[in-house]
């Protein structure tokens, strides 16, 4: 089965949702559908590299864990201690906020990709609307 690609123009953030939708149907049976899903996943992963796993720094993760520990302690001064922790680590928090802003800007970039369409005939009868909403750009 040789498929023609279709051109899909959208924001990277919307392509990230499409990627999530394809991961939801990755377990569906059928050789042709499996090839289409795998090929599209590879194309999307390449385009979205760096956006998929936008993890905070280790310093930020440790800071969040410390703040959660303090908040869970239910000490009378817990809120003040969390505020002080945030003030003492303002640079770590600012770096994370900058990282999130940069990621948001990247997600708003519009790109055009050549992807493989999914025929309605290849989809199982029990597919639900939630999954269809994620992959609707590819369904023909």
Image (cartoon, grey):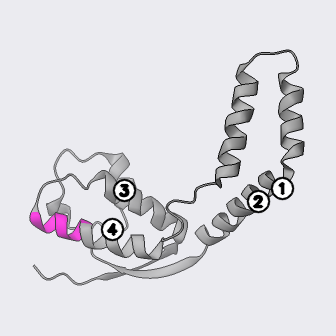
Secondary structure at badge 1 equals helix
Mark 4 Cα within 10 Å, few/some/many (few <14, many 20+)?
some
| CA–CA distance in space, label 4 to label 3 | 10 Å
Q: Write the residue at 36% across / 62% down.
A: 136
Q: Is residue 70 left or right of residue 129?
A: right
**Viewer-side label of 1, 4:** 1
Which disc number belongs to residue 21? 3
Q: Is residue 131 left or right of residue 91?
A: left
Dot 2 corresponds to which residue? Answer: 95
* Mark before the other along the chain sequence, 4 or 3: 3
Quadrant of the rendered image containing residue 32:
bottom left
Q: Write the residue at 88% across / 20% down.
A: 77
What is the magenta segment's predominant secondary structure?
Answer: helix
Using the image, determine if residue 106 lies above or below residue 135.
below
Dot 4 corresponds to which residue? Answer: 41
Q: Total marks drawn?
A: 4
* Mark before the other along the chain sequence, 4 or 2: 4
* Mark before the other along the chain sequence, 3 or 2: 3
* Mark before the other along the chain sequence, 3 or 1: 3
Residue 126 appears at what percent x and percent y?
19, 44
- The residue segment tinted magenta is 31-37
Q: Are marks 4 and 3 in contact (CB under 8 Å)?
A: no
Which disc number belongs to residue 91? 1
Q: Is residue 86 left or right of residue 50?
A: right
**Viewer-side label of 4, 3:** 4
Q: Are marks 1 and 2 in contact (CB under 8 Å)?
A: yes
Quadrant of the rendered image containing residue 94:
bottom right
**Viewer-side label of 3, 1:** 1
Query: Quadrant of the image for the N terminus?
Result: bottom left
Between 85 and 111, the one lying in front of the other is 85
């Amino acid at each position: 089965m040789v498929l023609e690609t279709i051109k899909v123009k959208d924001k990277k953030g919307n392509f990230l949702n499409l990627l999530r939708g394809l991961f939801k149907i990755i377990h569906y049976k059928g050789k042709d559908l499996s090839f289409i899903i795998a090929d599209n996943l590879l194309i999307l992963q390449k385009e979205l590299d760096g956006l998929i796993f936008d993890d905070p720094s280790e310093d930020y993760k440790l800071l969040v864990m410390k703040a959660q520990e303090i908040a869970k302690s239910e000490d009378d001064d817990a809120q003040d201690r969390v505020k002080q922790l945030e003030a003492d680590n303002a640079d770590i928090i600012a770096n994370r906020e900058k990282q999130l802003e940069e990621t948001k800007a990247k997600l708003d970039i519009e790109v055009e990709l050549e992807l493989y369409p999914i025929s309605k005939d290849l989809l199982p009868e029990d597919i639900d609307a939630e999954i269809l909403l994620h992959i609707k750009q590819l369904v023909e």
